[in-house]
Amino acid sequence: ACSSGAEDDSTLTVCTNVPFEPFEFSEDGEYAGFDIDLMNLLAERLDQSVEVVEISFDSISSGEALNAGTCDIAAAGLSITEERQAAMGMSQAYYRADQALVVPAGSDVATLDDLDGLQVAVQSGSTGEAYANDNAEQYGYEVVAFESMGDIASALTAGSVQASIADLATWNEMIETATDLALVQTIETAEHYGFAVQKDDTELLDEVNAMLDEIFADGTYAELYEQWIGE
Ligand code: ARG
């Protein structure tokens, strides 16, 4: 792979951004999650080992990190959009996602209609940010962008913002431990996650699509889905 990252051929360098449970998170210095398991399967197929590169989500979603050669592939709960398909090579879809509105527990905010004059936290470079920006005028809130989902959770807990819009599955998982937060509204955006490679790396793109085809067909995907996402 002439267009792969700085690493040698025995390493698959994977750009991601944590925390983003259940897709990627770090625990005792180890990375884990649905995306990480899928990248381990890809690496196995390529006879490589995974090396995780933690980087801002913004530099992943813009295509900047990949196209600068920072990593071979991005696995980051990355929603497929036309803009991203133009900037990078994007795989077939592997997960159907929506957004959600989260507030501090006990807040009076129950829906988007209650956000007038409030500050809404989003992750920089995310589809949640795009949704929030597109609807800010209608609902009268101000959008505040944060680097990571961890920073958003802290800001909500500290009360420096009054709400957040980000991916539903991740919020569902995060509020299990962050019990001072509550998920009040699902926002159906019908997104699909895909993996991203450098724009011209059709070789790796073919491999990741073939890996997904294989695990959709042989039950491995269903097993991992059940393990990480459930239902
Ligand atoms: N799905 C959303 C997007 O693509 C958010 C993904 C955030 N991912 C992460 N690892 N923090 O914009």
Image: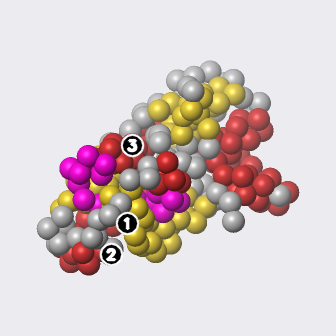
Residue 196 shows in the view: no
- Checking the image for residue 111, the label placed there is 2
Q: Quadrant of residue 225?
A: bottom right
Q: Nearer the viewer, residue 149 or 9?
A: 149
The quarter of the image holding the C terminus is bottom right
Earlier in the chain: of badge 3 and badge 2, it is 2
Circle 1 packing at 10 Å, graded few (<14), some (14-19), many (20+), is many
Query: Is 145 placed left or right of 97 in the picture?
Result: left
- Under mark 2, the amino acid is Thr
Q: Nearer the viewer, residue 13 or 199?
A: 13
Query: Is 150 placed left or right of 143 in the picture?
Result: right
- Checking the image for residue 101, the label placed there is 1
Q: Give yes or no for contact between labels 2 and 1 (Cβ–Cβ under 8 Å).
A: yes
Q: Residue at x 76, y 59 (%)?
A: 222
Q: Which residue is mark 3?
A: 150
Q: Give yes or no for contact between labels 3 and 1 (Cβ–Cβ under 8 Å).
A: no
Which span of residues is magenta-colored? 156-172
Residue 155 shows in the view: yes
Circle 3 packing at 10 Å, graded few (<14), some (14-19), many (20+), is some
Q: How is the image coloured?
A: secondary structure
Query: Is 130 placed left or right of 220 in the picture?
Result: left
Q: Residue at x 57, y 27 (%)?
A: 28
Q: Residue at x 72, y 57 (%)?
A: 226
**Residue 33 in the image, given as x and y percentages of width and height:** 62, 44
Circle 2 packing at 10 Å, graded few (<14), some (14-19), many (20+), is some
Q: Nearer the viewer, residue 200 or 174?
A: 174
- Under mark 3, the amino acid is Gly
Earlier in the chain: of badge 2 and badge 1, it is 1
**Residue 103 in the image, given as x and y percentages of width and height:** 33, 61
Q: Give yes or no for contact between labels 3 and 2 (Cβ–Cβ under 8 Å).
A: no
Query: Is 212 placed left or right of 15 in the picture?
Result: right
- Under mark 1, the amino acid is Leu
